[in-house]
Each structure stands twice: as structure tokens, then as C-alpha cells.
Image: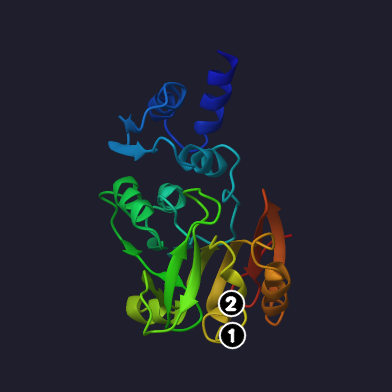
């Protein structure tokens, strides 16, 4: 009973009471589909996956629930997994236009279910990178939330192509990326090594998890590049670094 009450209290930060209660019951009973009566939508959490763990990180430990000095209108969810971060952002910023980026087919199908009916939402099944190239998808940890990419030449068989942030901004006709969430299992190192000079100074908020345990010097590369511009490390949440671009917004300390 105590566990249920704790879950309910935490979920009420994000959901109306009846929806929060439905989620508690769904989690306790290990439901794969949790129906939300108020939002009139479903949350899909696959069995034998990391989906519930991801849900708990986002909605219970508040991985991305930071008070921002802006109301984001343009959001990129890079490494979208099964779409739960996109769901969180859409609930918190309902008028925002969201681009989700995910590499793996099963996760992409889950994103479509968890974001069904969203307006101003688009899924790119690509790998976020700093140039146009091709990749094989690898699963070294045998988990549904830690797929990695390995670059291959164009003549080799490949699983997926890249997309760049400059391409997304041009395609969506965005002047800025108001919120950029990055959890791409080590590929952040290459993203911040080259060809960031256009999109990075036009990004207001960055929420990024670095993966030095997978790719050495990820965090060093990310921090070194971000420090070339007028960002501050505002806070951290459960391993996610949150940066604010002081050239594009004002904050009250």
C-alpha cells in the first residue's frame, strides 16, 4: 500500500488523479498497455524491456523536469527510445513542435504508439550525427535502451542513415532549437566534435547524458565544445547535464 501511495503522489506531478491512479494500477499489475481515462490515450510499456525503467526515470525521478526560463516551442528528442520523453515534453509544453530521433525499429514502433495523435510531432528514424553517413546498429548490452551505431562506408550494408541538426532546422524552418535533449549512447562525442558551429549557438537549452563508459572522453568533448559558447551548466539530474544558453535567454539566479 505504501508503495502505491508513493507512486501516486509522484505521478500526480504530471497526471490528473484518475490517470495517475491508472498508471499505478498498470505498473503494479505489469500491464503492457495502460489506458488513461482523462488524457484519453494509452501508455505502452513492453515486457522484457527497459521501458518501465525509462518511464520511472522520466516521470518518477524527474529526469527532465527542470524549471526553464522559457516556454520551449521547438524541441528535439534525440535518442527518443520509446517516446516517453516526448510524451513528457508534450504534456508539459503542449504547444511545442517536437522532433523525435530514434535508430531502432522496435523502439520506433513503440514511439508511434506512445505519441499517437500528437499534433506538431514528427519521428525521424535516423541516427543523429555531425554529417551525412551510414551506420550499422549494434546492441552490445542486450538492452532496449542502449543501442549504438557503427559508421560504415556507403558500399557496405547498412541499417540506417544519419540526420544532422542543421538538416532538421532547415526542414522544419526553425530559427532556434529551444530544447535539445540528447541521449544517444556515446554518439554525442562525434556530434560535438565537428560541424556544430551553426546549430549549437542557436540552441537555448541542452539536456544531455554523456556515455564515457561506452566511448572514452564523451563528457570532455561535449563540455569543451559547449564552453566555446555562452552556455552555463545550470544543473544536473540523475546524470543528465542541463545547459542554458545565456546569449539567447535571461535567467534569474
Residue at figure coordinates x 35%, y 39% from the top left: 44
Per the rendering, the mark at residue 110 is none
Quarter-of-image position of residue 80: bottom left
* Secondary-structure class at tag 1: loop
Q: Is residue 60 above or below residue 228?
A: above
Neighbourhood count class around disc 1 (C-alpha, 10 Å): few under 14, some 14–19, many 20 upward: few
The image shows residue 88 at horizontal and vertical percentages of 45, 48
Closer to the camera in the image, 99 or 40: 99
Whether residue 174 appears in this view of the structure is no
Whether tag 2 and tag 1 are in contact, CB under 8 A, the answer is yes
The residue to which callout 1 is attached is 194
Residue at figure coordinates x 60%, y 52% from the top left: 67
Closer to the camera in the image, 245 or 160: 160
Residue at the extreme left:
117
* Secondary-structure class at tag 2: helix
The residue to which callout 2 is attached is 190
Residue at figure coordinates x 48%, y 76% from the top left: 151
Real-space CA distance between mark 2 and mark 1, rounded to the nearest whole angstrom: 7 Å
Whether residue 97 appears in this view of the structure is yes
Closer to the camera in the image, 192 or 2: 192
Q: Is residue 201 left or right of residue 251?
A: left
Amino acid at each position: 500500500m505504501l508503495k502505491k501511495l508513493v507512486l501516486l503522489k509522484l505521478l500526480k506531478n504530471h497526471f490528473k488523479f484518475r490517470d495517475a491512479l491508472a498508471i499505478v494500477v498498470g505498473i503494479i499489475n505489469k500491464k503492457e498497455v495502460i489506458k488513461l481515462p482523462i488524457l484519453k490515450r494509452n501508455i505502452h510499456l513492453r515486457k522484457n524491456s527497459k521501458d518501465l525503467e525509462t518511464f520511472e526515470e522520466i516521470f518518477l525521478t524527474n529526469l527532465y523536469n527542470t524549471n526553464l526560463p522559457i516556454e520551449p516551442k521547438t524541441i528535439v528528442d534525440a535518442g527518443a527510445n520509446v517516446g516517453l520523453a516526448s510524451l513528457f515534453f508534450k504534456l508539459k509544453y503542449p504547444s511545442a513542435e517536437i522532433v523525435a530521433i530514434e535508430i531502432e525499429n522496435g523502439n520506433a514502433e513503440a514511439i508511434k504508439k506512445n505519441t499517437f495523435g500528437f499534433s506538431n510531432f514528427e519521428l525521424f528514424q535516423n541516427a543523429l550525427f555531425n554529417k551525412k553517413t551510414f551506420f550499422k546498429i549494434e546492441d552490445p548490452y542486450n538492452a532496449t535502451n542502449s543501442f549504438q551505431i557503427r559508421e560504415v562506408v556507403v558500399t557496405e550494408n547498412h541499417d540506417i542513415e544519419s540526420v544532422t541538426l542543421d538538416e532538421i532546422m532547415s526542414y522544419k524552418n526553425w530559427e532556434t532549437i529551444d530544447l535539445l535533449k540528447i541521449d544517444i549512447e556515446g554518439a554525442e562525442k562525434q556530434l560535438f566534435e565537428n560541424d556544430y558551429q551553426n546549430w549549437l549557438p542557436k540552441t537555448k537549452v541542452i539536456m544531455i547524458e554523456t556515455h564515457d563508459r561506452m566511448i572514452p572522453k564523451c563528457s570532455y568533448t561535449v563540455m569543451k565544445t559547449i564552453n566555446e559558447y555562452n552556455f552555463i551548466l545550470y544543473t544536473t539530474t540523475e546524470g543528465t547535464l542541463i545547459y542554458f544558453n545565456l546569449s539567447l535567454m535571461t535567467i534569474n539566479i
